[in-house]
Image (spheres, helix red, strand yellow):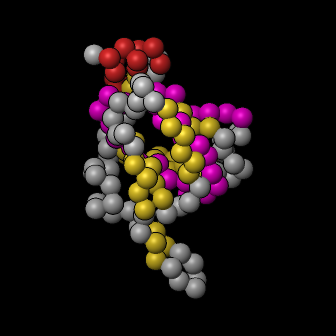
Amino acid sequence: MFKLIDIPKIEDRRGNLSVIEHDCIPFDIKRVYYLYDVPSDSYRGGHAHKEQSEFLVALSGSFDVILDDGVEKHTVMLNKPNKGLLIPTKIWRELENFSSGAVCLVLASGAFEEADYIRDYDQFKSFKST
């Protein structure tokens, strides 16, 4: 369903460095975007993708990712810049509980295409049952 992935971390007295390369995630990156300045009482996401996979990283702060495969729900807190969450296709996701200063980096397997989104939960449940 989903997978937490360790991002290599190079530790140095001057600070840490993490690198995401082609062998870290199972897709070629086609789009990069990030969420920031999200009020703590707001949420993001609220959709699933038919074909696109995503990899989320909390570059700063923390937030919860609620994942729903149509049968089970799981909540994953992201709060370390060297851990990423791989979300495969056909998984409903919601992001909430953003801490002050949280930054969510998203690496996506596809360019933005509205037809790939399922934005209605009932339609998602119907899509999953077919």
Give the answer, above or below, for where 83 lies relative to 86.
below
Give the answer, above or below, for where 24 lies relative to 97.
below
Q: Quadrant of residue 38?
A: top right
Q: Quadrant of residue 127?
A: top left
Q: Quadrant of the C terminus?
A: top left
Indicate the position of residue 90 as horizontal and vertical percent values.
35, 30
Regarding residue 113, the answer to whether it shows in the image is no
Give the answer, above or below, for where 8 lies relative to 47.
below
Give the answer, above or below, for where 77 lies relative to 80.
above
Residue shown at 62% from the left, 33% from the top: 43
Indicate the position of residue 32 as horizontal and vertical percent values.
42, 48
| Dominant secondary structure, magenta | strand
Regarding residue 104, the answer to whether it shows in the image is yes
Q: Quadrant of residue 48?
A: top left
Q: Which residues are drawn in magenta?
A: 41-68
Left or right position of 11 against 126:
right
- The total number of labels drawn is 0
Q: Quadrant of the N terminus?
A: top left
Residue shown at 37% from the left, 34% from the top: 112
Indicate the position of residue 18 as horizontal and vertical percent values.
46, 69
| Residue in front for this viewpoint, 36 or 125 | 125
Residue shown at 53% from the left, 45% from the top: 76
Q: Residue furthest bottom?
A: 13
The answer to if 53 sits in the magenta stretch is yes
Left or right position of 69 against 79:
left
Indicate the position of residue 111 as horizontal and vertical percent values.
33, 39
